[in-house]
Image (cartoon, rainbow, N blue to C red):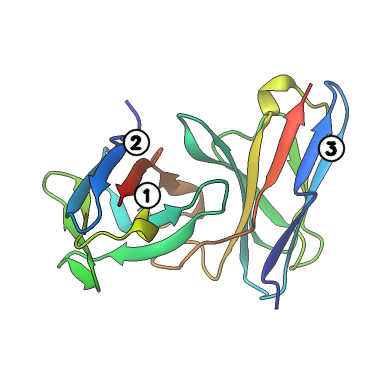
């Protein structure tokens, strides 16, 4: 049981290209999240989803698009990549939106934009 | 001012030592609190939740001080395997979008 899988794990792309990072979970957790992690900033929320077809912006949504047509998948698309989007991206799931539920993270996708 | 602040460290302590980290949060409406551990180039994993009355899990003790708006993590009898970055996490209100991560405190245990 893989839990959460992210792909690709490593990606190098060029400025202006479209990039999609995939996130797949096997648990059927309601909530899914995309975070980016940069030195000095900790993890910052990009987008999250409470259920299939329900998504909402987080702290740093500009330049990103998400969709959630199926409960288990939550892809993150950079429509026109910029150097400032070079980062480590983590997908996470949670059984509920708030309270004491644990966040489960994927292994991360390391993206470099040249 | 950041909503959740941690001393970045690094804390470099000998094996067997006791080490403590603090984390302060700015929003008094914060409702739930956690410590996550992140190993180098790995994903964060839950270490422990932090309850109002304080809680202990083996060598780890977490405390919450709502009046002063900080949480703490105490590690006793530190092991080499405790070397990692420790992330303070605060859930504000009852909203999934208000899960705020601190930047982390790096801990290095030396033999």
Instruction: Sort mark 3 into few (<14), some (14-19) or many (20+) by Cα contacts within 10 Å.
Output: some
Residue located beneath label 3 in the image = A19
Q: Chain of mark 3?
A: A
The numbered dot on residue A87 is: none
Q: Quadrant of residue A51?
A: bottom right
Q: Is residue B97 left or right of residue B57?
A: right
Tell me the mark number nearer the camera, choosing from 1 and 3.
1
Label 1 sits on a secondary structure element that is strand
Residue located beneath label 2 in the image = B3
The numbered dot on residue B86 is: 1
> How far across and how far down the image is residue B107, in percent?
33, 45
| The N terminus of chain B: image quadrant | top left
Q: Find the distance from the CA under tag 2 to the CA under tag 1.
A: 17 Å
Kindly identify the residue that appears in the image at 18 percent across and 54 percent down.
Answer: B17
Q: Earlier in the sequence, mark 2 or mark 1?
A: 2
Label 2 sits on a secondary structure element that is loop
Instruction: Sort mark 1 into few (<14), some (14-19) or many (20+) by Cα contacts within 10 Å.
Output: many
């Amino acid at each position: 049981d893989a839990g959460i899988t992210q792909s690709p794990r490593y990606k190098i792309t060029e400025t202006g290209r479209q990039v999609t990072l995939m996130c797949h979970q096997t648990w059927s957790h309601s909530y899914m999240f995309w975070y980016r992690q940069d030195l000095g900033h900790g993890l910052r929320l990009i987008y999250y989803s409470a259920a299939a077809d329900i998504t909402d912006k987080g702290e740093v949504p500009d330049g990103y698009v998400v969709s959630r047509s199926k409960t288990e998948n939550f892809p993150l698309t950079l429509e026109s990549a910029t150097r400032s989007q070079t980062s480590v991206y983590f997908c996470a799931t949670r059984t509920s939106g708030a309270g004491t539920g644990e966040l489960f993270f994927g292994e991360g996708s390391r993206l470099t934009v040249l | 001012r950041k909503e959740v602040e941690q001393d970045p460290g690094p804390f470099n302590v000998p094996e067997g030592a006791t080490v403590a980290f603090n984390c302060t949060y700015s929003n008094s409406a914060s409702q739930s609190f956690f410590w996550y551990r992140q190993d180098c180039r790995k994903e964060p994993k839950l270490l422990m939740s932090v309850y109002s009355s304080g809680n202990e899990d083996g060598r780890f003790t977490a405390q919450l001080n709502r009046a002063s708006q900080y949480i703490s993590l105490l590690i006793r009898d530190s092991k080499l395997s405790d070397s990692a970055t420790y992330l303070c996490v605060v859930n504000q209100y009852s909203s999934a979008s208000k899960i705020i991560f601190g930047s982390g405190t790096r801990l290095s245990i030396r033999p």
